[in-house]
Amino acid sequence: MNPQLPPLYPITDTKLSGLPHSRQVALLVEGGATVIQIRDKDCTADELYRATVACVAIARAQGVRIIVNDRADVALAADADGVHLGQDDLPAGEARTLLGPSRIVGVSTHTLQQAIEASSLPVDYVAVGPAFPTSTKVNPDPVVGLTLIAEVSRRIDKPVVGIGGIALERARAVLNAGAASVAVISALYTSGDISLRTTEFLNLLTG
Ligand code: 3NM
């Protein structure tokens, strides 16, 4: 557990990018991403499974890890590297039992209480958000701001991932608040060049 998370944690989005998950993964990897989440709220389990298998094939050849949003069963079936759980998904302990000790299990939280509770579960990281207003998530929780990210980072001993509305110019502040990584969707897909934007994020976050 607790593998090192890179400072940038890109998440795929077929609607915003207009591309299949596997093509997004190829471009994100080209830009330097080393952990990528496959997120698709609209597809069937069968479609998500097939997309994840294709993404794992591309990513693993480059030493890049693939994490599946919501579905521990799909992550296991597709031999992905982990799962990212929402508050309404399988409990983290059950996902850990399914996926075993080596795969990554992360969880989304939106309040201090949720984050502290999540940190006591067998998870590798705790995501906290939305950091800023976001139009990517349907019915997002209230914005938590950098204040909660900083407080959670102080109070738990697991890596914190900031998520929600993280544009290039705001990304560094999220790490400065104490997060180990920033999870990003729209800011990667709205500039036109996904690889370049990925590299720009990484340069900014590691520089
Ligand atoms: N989860 P963007 S916010 C998927 O608060 C997701 O847990 C959130 O997309 C949370 O970078 C969010 O385009 C959307 O704002 C992130």
Image (cartoon, rainbow, N blue to C red):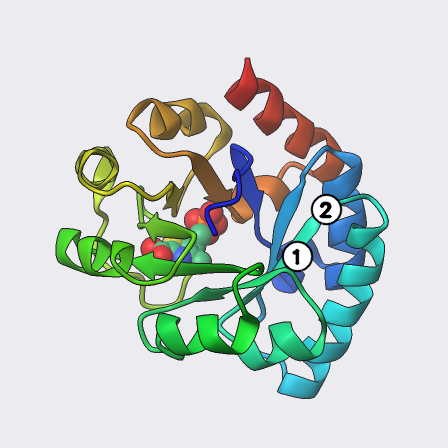
Quadrant occupied by the C terminus: top right
Residue sitting farthest toward the left: 113
Q: Residues within 10 Å of mark 2 (few under 14, many from 20)?
A: some
Under circle 2, the secondary element is loop
Indicate left or right for 196 with 44 as reference: right
Quarter residue 48 falls in: bottom right
What residue is at 84 percent from the left and 61 percent from the top?
57
Q: Position of residue 115 (x, y in %)?
A: 23, 54
Indicate left or right for 35 with 4 as reference: right
What residue is at 76 percent from the left and 41 percent from the top?
29
Q: Can you tell which mark lies on residue 64?
A: 2
> Where 56 sits versus 156, above or below?
below
Q: Can you tell which mark lies on residue 66?
A: 1
* Front residue of 174 and 73: 73
What residue is at 78 percent from the left and 52 percent from the top?
59
Total numbered labels: 2
Q: Is residue 163 visible?
A: yes
Q: Position of residue 34 (x, y in %)?
A: 67, 41
Q: Is label 1's Cβ within 8 Å of ligand 1?
A: no
Under circle 1, the secondary element is strand
Q: Is residue 41 visible?
A: no
Q: Position of residue 69 (x, y in %)?
A: 53, 67
Q: Amino acid at mark 2?
A: Val
Disc 1 to disc 2, C-alpha distance = 7 Å
Indicate left or right for 6 with 51 as reference: left
